[in-house]
Structures are given as C-alpha cells and as structure tokens.
Image: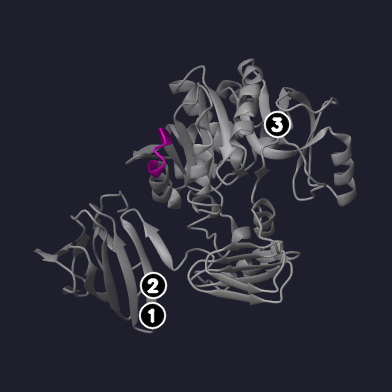
Amino acid sequence: MIIPVILSGGAGTRLWPLSRALYPKQLLPIFGEWTMLQDTVQRLSGIERIGPVICVCNDEHRFLVAEQLREVEADTCTIILEPCGRNTAPAAAIAALMLVESRPGALMLVMPADHVILDRKAFGDSIESGLGTADAGGLVTFGIKPRSPETGYGYIRAESGSWKPGAERRVTEFVEKPSQERAESYLASGDYFWNSGMFLFRPEVYLAELESAHPEMLEACRNALRLAKRDLDFLRLDEESFAACPSDSIDYAVMEKTSNAFVVPLDAGWSDVGGWSVLWDVQDRDRDGNVIRGDVLVHEVHNSYLHATSRLVAAVGLDDHVIVETADAVLVASKEHVHEVKAIVDQLKMQNREEPLIHRRVYRPWGSYETVDQGERFKVKRITVKAGAALSLQKHNHRAEHWIVVTGTALVTVEERRVALIENQSIYIPVGASHRLENQGEVPLELIEVQSGGYLGEDDIIRLEDNYGRL
C-alpha cells in the first residue's frame, strides 16, 4: 500500500495578496474549481495501491484543511497539526513514525500541497516506475525534466545515461540554485533535473537514514508524537517537543547524505507555483499573451497576468505586468520584478497590518465573516453560518453586538434566553452577556453584525463552550 503524505504547512507569501498567512496558496483555487490541496489529492486517483491520506498542516489551517478534504471525499487517515514550522524533514519523520506502527510494509509518497501537475497520467506512471526501487529499500525522488535553464530551482544530478520517462537513475548530487551559465550547461548535459520535492520510500528506511544523519531531530519527533493529543479529528503534536526539533528539509537532512538515493524522471507539466510570473507561464493565454481571471477589461495589454476577485479591473497600455486585486489590496508589478513581492509583505508586517495575515473574508469552522465597514467605535460584519453549524458560546468584555438576520433562520442564546429569528428580525447582545448563534436550518444563515464599544479586536472573545475544541 502507498500512503500519501501531503505537506500543507507553507504560507505562500510570493502569491500575495491572494495568498495570506491564514489562507495560503495551497488552500486557494488558483487554477480552477478545486484548491491546490484538493488537486493534490485528486491526482492520486488511478494509482494502484493508494491508501488513506495523511496531511500535515499548520494548526491555524486545520478546519480549512479538514473541510477541503471532506469536499473531495478524501479517505483521510489523519490530519497532523504542527504547532510551529520545522520544514519538511520533521514532518515526514512524524508520518513515518506513525506508519511504522500502524501500517507495516507500506510506502510513503511525500508530496507538497502547492504544486501544479497538468498531466496526471504521466505523474501516475512515474510513481508506478519508482515502486520497485522504493520497495527494495531505495529512497526515490522525482526529478522534473527541465524545460529551460531555470535559476530559481535546485537541481538533481543523476548518473549519466539517456533520458527515459520513468527510468530511475542513481543520484550523484543535489545542486543549489545555479547561475544562468551553469543552468544552461545543466540543461545541455541531460543529466540534471529540477528538484520537485516529492519522495517515495519505506518509512523504516527513511527513519534509519534520519537516525544516522540527525538523531537529535528524530528524538524530538518521537517525543512530539509520544506526547501528542487527539483533538476532534486532528492529532496535535506536543508543542514543546516539536519546537525543540531542528528545522531542515528532507533534501538536506537525508537525501544529500545517503548513498541510497534514486531519481525517477517526471515530465508531467509540473510547477511549484513560486510566484505570479509562473502562473502566467503555465496557464492558457489569449491571443495577446494575457492570462485573465475574473472581471477584467484590457486595451493594448500584452503578455500580462490580470486577476480580479471582487471588482472590475481595467488595464490600458501595459506589457509584461502582473495585476492582482482582492477586496482589501491591489498588487501592480512588472513580471521582471514580481518575485520581489515579499519586500511588500515584509513592510506590511513591520507596520503590524493585517493584510499579510488574513483576507477581508475570514473563514471559521462554522462558516465565515467579512468586515464591511469600521470606524473608531464601531465595526460592521457580514456573517455566514453553514447549515447545522453553531458559533461558540461566548462573551465580550469590551463590545456590544446587534444582529440582523438577512436570510435563513437563527437560533440565538443570550444568557438564559433562547430566541428564534427569521429574515429582517434582530436582537441586541449587551457587553458581558454570554451568547451563541446557531443555524439549525438546511440553508446557510446570513446576518449583519454591528459591533460597538471601546475595543473591537478579535481577541476580545471569551469562549465558554465550543463544538470545535477552541476553548
């Protein structure tokens, strides 16, 4: 059996403003109907021996991850919550430790959640090609056939030989991101592949290599898993133990140190979606070379990427540009410099602004809310509660709230009183009163919330009871 281990811990700052720390690129529908995480799961269909998915993610993303896996009916083994980021090697070690105990004899297929692979059949064929080597104890990685002398990727050098799809070759070295001249020589040689960051191996083989190269990392992972706690459908790693774990990638921690690494060539329309210019490169373009998403009008615009999410975007007389609009931010950059968007994100963080962290619409396990307007002593939100869902029983020390139902039926608890509200009805919640909002109907509940008070921060929530374990 092959157990997919999907790593979904990244923040995706290079795709700001669409990608935010609390709603990163892997949880967004970058290319179509499904999110990148959902696409990662769905491309596994058709591969024989595939078992239930293990997903490793950030604690703050847990409900979004669980909901997205549910939407694609993923057979999920468990969702592992990392209390802090420690790169890919510890994440893989945690999954391997679990599998050694629960599924002896299984193989691990480690994949990032934020990659694009256009040719699913070629992907599946390459996985099948690596099974024999992995079953025999080899550590298999998948090398992307280079399409150009790319300087933004790491490379894998294989033993000399002719390129054949799916034919594994022993790895001779891993190479850092090269200069342009060196990348051109790599492309010409035929022995170098882009490093995809995907791996296939037996859990016990990976753990043995990690024990040899980084015993302190493995020990920290063992402690974090031994002291882990179940939280609803999640496995929450011990925070202190995992924080003490060294941070390193699978490449650095294991693959560069082992003599047992093999590379299987993969030519399947792969991209790691490392920035907006990459999205322009891998998507279908119109006759002027433009990729257009959303409500966009252009005149004399060429070879550009234009993405609107909440309003009309109009562009005139531009070449080789990226324009990305969200409800609270607009990015305009030349494709040549769009990789420097992280500098803007860093400035926003230094100013303690919310734009690097969240969108105007914020998702919660019960639904979502969107800030419509705010001033010095008031804030207006649009709240959507999923059918059958309920907010926590809570109270606020600094604000009062007024709820007006727009659509659906709300069951509201205020102290000892329970009131059913329908469209156009409202209720007032005083400062300090315990209250809860429930949707016991079969359609989404939408309401307007008007907050008033001297402090309106999201941390002014005291949860008394919660269906989602957020006390």
Alpha carbon separation for disc pair 1 and 2: 8 Å
Is 76 included in the stretch rendered in magenta?
yes
Q: Is residue 203 left or right of residue 209?
A: left
Q: Secondary structure at mark 1?
A: strand
Q: Which residues are magenta?
A: 70-78
Question: Decide: marks 1, 2 in contact (CB < 8 A)?
Answer: yes
What amino acid does circle 1 point to?
Gln
Above or below 392: residue 186? above
Which residue is drawn at the image coordinates 43% and 39% (left, top)? 79
Q: Nearer the viewer, residue 209 or 281?
A: 281
**Label whose residue precedes the other's in the sequence (1 or 3):** 3
Residue count near mark 2 (Cα–Cα under 10 Å), binned few <14, some 14–19, many ≥20: some
* Disc number lying in front (2 or 3): 2
Q: Earlier in the sequence, mark 2 or mark 3?
A: 3
Q: Which of 6 and 267 lies nearest the eye of the viewer?
A: 267
Out of 209 and 110, give the one closest to the viewer: 110
Query: Disc 2 residue type?
Result: Thr
